[in-house]
Image (cartoon, rainbow, N blue to C red):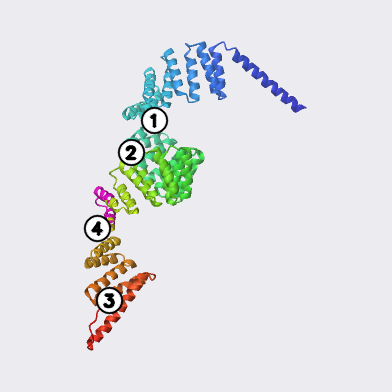
Amino acid sequence: MEQLLMLWNWLQEASDHRETRAADEGEISSAEQAMRLANERVSEADYENALKFAEEAIRLEPSNAECHVCKGQICESFDRYEEAAAAYSEAIKLEPDCIGFYFLQGEAYSFLEKYEEAAAAFSAAIRLDPSLAIAHASQGDAYANLEKHDEAIDSYSTAIRLAPHRADSYCKIGNIHIELGMHEDAISILSAAIKMDPSCSEAYMLLGNAYRSLKQHNEAFGAYSTAVALNPSNAYYHCHEGMAYENLGRRDEAIAEYSAAIALEPFNHFYHFCLGKAYSGWKRHDEALAAFSTAIKLKPSSCDYYYCLGDTYENLEKYEEAIAAFSAAIGLKPSDGFYRYRLGDACKSLEKYDEAIAAFSAAIDLEPSCAHYHFSLGDAYEGLEKYDEALAAFSAAIALEPSNAVYRYRLGDACKSLEKYDEAIAAFSAAIDLEPSRAHYHFSLGDAYENLKKYDEALAAFSAAIKLDPSNAYTYYYRGHIFDTRWVENGESSDLQMAIADFEKALVLDPSDTAARNRKKACEDTLVEMRGQYATLRTGGSSYGR
């Protein structure tokens, strides 16, 4: 019974409150009363009705500047900055000597990224009171956003002169110097800020940025760590400490810092992206995949995030998914040749050579001076056995990057497939001149010489390959084959013995090589036959032959 009575009383009080409020709202007789009701609605986050009361205040007393300011501040409460700026303009018309109105107008313009108008508003406030340090600092912010660095530095310097113990203006000057690449100067300015206020976490944060730009990673790490210690609830600081750990090769700690940043701001896409990059660095691709996927959910308009997702899928050999991710990146940024190149690479991995050729060709159209795009196009044409087109693509790559041995080697390969052996020899020789320690270049040169029946040159090339890579059974087999072929043509028994020795070596290195075993057996049988015939000759028998 007692509980029912309490509930009844509560309901009665609520009813009385609603009736009073309704009466209050129904009998608005002054702008002051309307503004009071507007402020009450703001405290309840009921911005639409708050705005109605503010507009009612303006209707009742249009010449009262405070009514317009009330409307402006309510509009700012739910991000309607255009209307806020317009309301402050009306207030300024009514009271052009009120400094605060200009300041509010400048802040609204800043939110709208209308920095020219913001700078003008703060300048007007300064004309009314040149001693207002915060107005100079805000003017500096507007100039900085307009990249008017000299004017920004002048404004911040004035703010420092008027309020010499405020470290934030030093920080802003330091940040401008970082943006201008004047990192040593930035370090001096930020160090002065820290000396003035050792608890200024922003100064340490920016100091870390300056050191990182100079690749002084230990010093950057120290600055970021101090910023985090001073302000452990700042996710941005944790993220930068994570970057410092990465630069020092300490990825586990980097992952921990990125995770800390995410715990503080779970909806920040960039922190998930950084976490994904760190996982990729450790080749923890499944975890990287999860991080990049989250980053994309939070910011689906980022082409870079889709690119990294595609790269991770490729590392996991999930090429269909990689194709989808690279295609999404291209959809967001169709002018990027590199994304198209990576799409082509993924298609090539699935032997989808026509799609690869289309992607590489599109990349070349966008960035025709990239040699590697031409090379990849040639590689795709070779996959379709279109050797003339491959030869043209490899030649284009060489024209752009003549010192690349791989391009010349692959040109030789295409020429060989077209039985253009002289051109193949020229290409392989050029590759060897650039990179003489590549055994397979010498091997391919020997193969081209063999096709022209230039056995001495072929033997020299295969011997060079064996010297560089004595563990390759295949090269011994090919050299043995040439010795065998030359013996058939010239009848030199030493060639036959060299052939047997090479086939034996090939079998030692690869006992499963049936071709080498058969060749060795045939040569050995021939050698036995030769010796028998030679013995017959010595005793007056007939001549020998193979």
Instruction: Tell me the amino acid under the disc marked 2.
Output: His
Which of the two discs, 4 and 1, labels the residue nearer the N terminus? Answer: 1
Instruction: Tell me the amino acid under the disc marked 3.
Output: Gln
Range shown magenta: 392-413
Judged from the image, the secondary structure of the residue bearing numbered disc 3 is helix
From the viewer's perspective, is residue 512 above or below residue 157?
below
Where is residue 481? Give x, y as percent: 29, 70
Where is residue 195? Give x, y as percent: 39, 36
Residue 117 placement: quadrant = top left
Q: Kindly identify which residue carries mark 2.
A: 183
**Residue density around tag 2, few if under 14, some if 14–19, many if 20 or more, within 10 Å:** many
Circle nearer the viewer, 4 or 1: 4
**Residue density around tag 4, few if under 14, some if 14–19, many if 20 or more, within 10 Å:** some
Where is residue 56? Give x, y as percent: 53, 14
From the viewer's perspective, is residue 452 above or below residue 161?
below
Q: Kindly identify which residue carries mark 3.
A: 497
Which of the two discs, 4 and 2, labels the residue nearer the N terminus? Answer: 2
Residue 171 placement: quadrant = top left
Q: Are marks 1 and 3 in contact (CB under 8 Å)?
A: no
Quote the CA–CA distance across marks 4 and 3.
Answer: 32 Å
Residue drawn at the location 26% of the way across and 50% of the way down: 392
Quote the CA–CA distance across marks 1 and 3.
Answer: 87 Å
Numbered badge on residue 198: none
